[in-house]
Image (cartoon, helix red, strand yellow):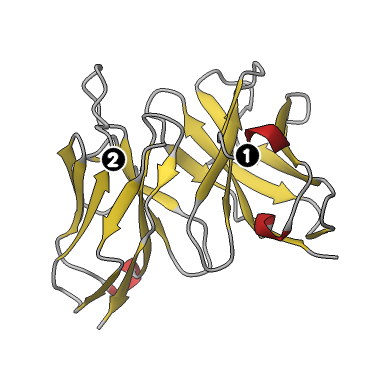
Amino acid sequence: DIVMTQSPLSLPVTPGEPASISCRSSQSLLHSDGNNYLDWYLQKPGQSPHLLIYLGSNRASGVPDRFSGSGSGTDFTLKISRVEAEDVGIYYCVQTLQAPTFGQGTKLEIK
Amino acid sequence: QVQLQESGPGLVKPSQTLSLTCAVSGGSISSGNYYWSWIRQPPGKGLEWIGYIHYSGSAYFNPSLKSRVAMSVDTSNNQFSLRLVSVTAADTAVYFCARRLKVEHSFDFWGQGTLVTVSS
């Protein structure tokens, strides 16, 4: 299994400030087709997860441009340029190169 | 807009079989571009992929659950199902169904989830 490790696990942020979440995989997620099979999801309180970023850096439909994903191989980052109150929830990275495995989740809260 | 809706018993006894169905609306389950997936989340914990199935019948399961899991597709009713046998309290979770893109591998639409409790 590919193990996914997120940090930090808790992230208090002041509205308007940036935020960054790291995700590391135990094996490279870079496929020979050039894609990194790494997605980011946000699970808002009481809701199901929804897709934010796919293939490492592609914003899903309807996702605000303050969200961005970067990285390659084993190290990935989700950045929020200016956090808003509606961004609270738990952020998960997941690798889909092999049998999907999720990170532990990062809980973003507003200071 | 695609919508997915899980249904099934909210309470299952230990050693029995958990059975859930996911109804898909707003799109055809017979499209070759998707895999139909199950993911679960124990109360207060993270997400665990259970498996996914293509409308053709090809399926892939989490190795840790493979011996206890079965999935099926019902194209006539545009729905797919999960069966998990020999359940224990550790199988208590919110069960989500989701659509997985065949090319990008991402889960782009999710159901709202249904809580299944394993208890006598």
Q: Secondary structure at mark 2?
A: loop
> Taking A69 as reference, is A19 above or below it?
below
Which residue is depicted at the point 55% across and 28% down? B35
Q: Quadrant of the C terminus of chain A?
A: bottom left
Q: Quadrant of the N terminus of chain A?
A: top left
Read off the chain for label 1.
Answer: B
Q: Secondary structure at mark 1?
A: loop
Tag 1: residue type? Answer: Leu
Q: Tell me the CA gap for discs 2 and 1.
A: 21 Å
On the image, which quarter does residue B103 sit in? top left
Q: Give the x, y percent position of residue B34.
A: 52, 26
Q: Give the x, y percent position of residue B119.
A: 80, 65
Q: Is residue A37 left or right of residue A83?
A: right
Pointer 1 residue:
B65
> Taking A13 as reference, is B88 above or below it?
above
Q: Is residue A13 left or right of residue B14?
A: left
Q: Is residue B71 left or right of residue A58?
A: right
Pointer 2 residue:
A26
